[in-house]
Image (cartoon, rainbow, N blue to C red):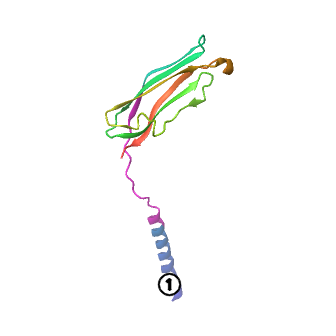
Amino acid sequence: MTSQFYPFLRFFTVLFAWLLISCSSEEPKTEEEPEMNVEAELIFFNYKNDLEEDTFVWEYEVQFHNHSDFTVKGVPLVTYRYSNSEDFTITPGFTSENNPCPTIAPGETCTLSFYQEGDLQSEIYGEPLEIIFVKAEYRGEPAE
């Protein structure tokens, strides 16, 4: 009688293990996040060294257009590099206090403007480098 019971026991053990594995491997369903569509348009980028005065002027303006049908929240990023390096790029960030474009409503535009002038101090640092624009982007997510 015991030997007739083992095939049923094996069958139910395998069935139970299969059910346990198949039920526990199901991932919870999550809502898909809508696709964000923010376009960055470079209006101008200017970096000039004045070697006679030993000064520089650096300015740029980028517009971020939200083509999504929802408000986005995030941060604008402008990446640049120095003229002596193809591989090394710099992307300065913003804090929540100085972010000029924390949210952009659907169909709206936000403009990031930057202006800086100063001393080159070429007697300390040597021949000045040029700063070259690489790209601009808006990194974010749908606003709640």
Indicate whether residue 22 is drawn in magenta. Answer: yes
Query: What is the quadrant of residue 69 in the picture?
Result: top left
Query: What is the quadrant of residue 68 in the picture?
Result: top left
Q: Is residue 14 left or right of residue 109?
A: right
- Residue 33 x %, y %: 38, 46
Which residue is found at the position 39% from the left and 54% from the top?
30
Residue that protrudes farthest toward the top in the picture: 52
Looking at the rendered structure, the secondary structure element under dot 1 is: helix
Q: According to the image, label 1 marks what residue? A: 5
Q: Nearer the viewer, residue 144 or 24?
A: 144
Indicate whether residue 88 is drawn in magenta. Answer: no
Query: What is the quadrant of residue 66 in the picture?
Result: top left
How many marks can you see? 1
Could you tell me what secondary structure mostly forms the magenta stretch?
loop
Residue that protrudes farthest toward the bottom in the picture: 1
What are the residue bounds of the magenta stretch? 21-41
Which residue is found at the position 49% from the left and 36% from the top?
94
Q: Nearer the viewer, residue 127 or 86?
A: 127
- Residue 125 x %, y %: 67, 21
In the rendered structure, which amino acid carries the disc numbered 1?
A: Phe
Q: Is residue 84 left or right of residue 67?
A: right
Q: Nearer the viewer, residue 1 or 123?
A: 123
